[in-house]
Image (cartoon, helix red, strand yellow):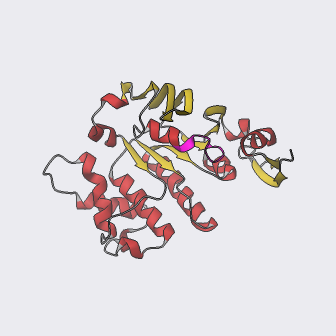
Amino acid sequence: MLEARNLSVGYADKTILEDISVLIAKEDISVLVGANGSGKSTLLKALAGLHPLKAGQVHLDGEVLHHLPRREVASKIAVLSQSPQAPEGLTVYQLVEHGQFAQRRFFEAPDPDGVMAALDFTGMSTYAHRPFEALSGGEQQRVWISLALAQKPQMLLLDEPTSYLDMGHQIDVLELLKRLHREQGIGMLMVLHDINHASLYADRIMAIREGAILADGAPSEIVTSELVRALFGAEVSVLSDPTGQHPYCVPKGRLKV
């Protein structure tokens, strides 16, 4: 469980997030949505312990995260940043092997079975000995998820995991993450640009505007034309899928001012 208590985050004299309190349960797929520059990625990084805080605390399983050794944090939380970079010359297997660092004792040998199990889950085991840089964008994203899975985390934090992918590969990645959550019980918090993707895959959506949480709840509770107008300055019609649980937005144009 991750919890932010009265969190304020910023750069130098600029405050990005102010007095944020939120609890992220591992039982849910939670998604942060909001306009560019609203503070989504900053909140994700702060919750992962990757951004200094101006005020407040982040708690991981009841303990102050910034007081814990990074190795212990990494044994519980895996982070997949936006556009991660891999060292040149690594095979897929070698890259995923790095995910075991937090789980191994010093001088302990890697676990080949663990690496291959992670690659099997993501459908990338046949690519194990290929150069990572030779893969397509969608394949590379699956390898990064494999690396996170090899870390054996309790929670996975992802910053725009569908960026730069076409529609088909976006759905592939989101379906993979949903299956990972369902079958392995890994909690998830991700930043997504597409509110329709958030509505379809999230148990809970947190809408961020200007560094504050504007709305927080199940998609069926909070996804409205008024919310989209407030977040993005866009006019939409909000329709509902047959279950009534996953509203989706049809764009009508920009808000006229």
Magenta-drawn stretch contains 37: yes
- Of all residues shown, which one is farthest toward the right? 256
Q: Where residue 166 appears, x then y in whole percent?
A: 61, 67
Nearest the viewer among 207 and 124 is 207
Using the image as rendered, state which of residue 166 and residue 256 is in the foreground: 256
Left or right: 47, with 191 as reference point:
left
Residue 220 shown left or right of residue 38 in the figure = right
> In the image, residue 27 lies at what x, y percent?
50, 37
**Image vertical order of residue 99 relative to residue 74, above or below:** below
Above or below, comparing residue 107 to residue 20 in the picture: below
Magenta stretch, overall SS? loop
Give the vertical position of 157 relative to 63 (above or below). Answer: below
Q: Dividing the image into 4 quarters, which one contains the C terminus?
A: top right
Q: Quarter-wise, where is residue 120 in the image?
A: bottom left
Q: Residue at x 37, y 73 (%)?
A: 127
Where are the magenta residues, as a range?
Answer: 33-41
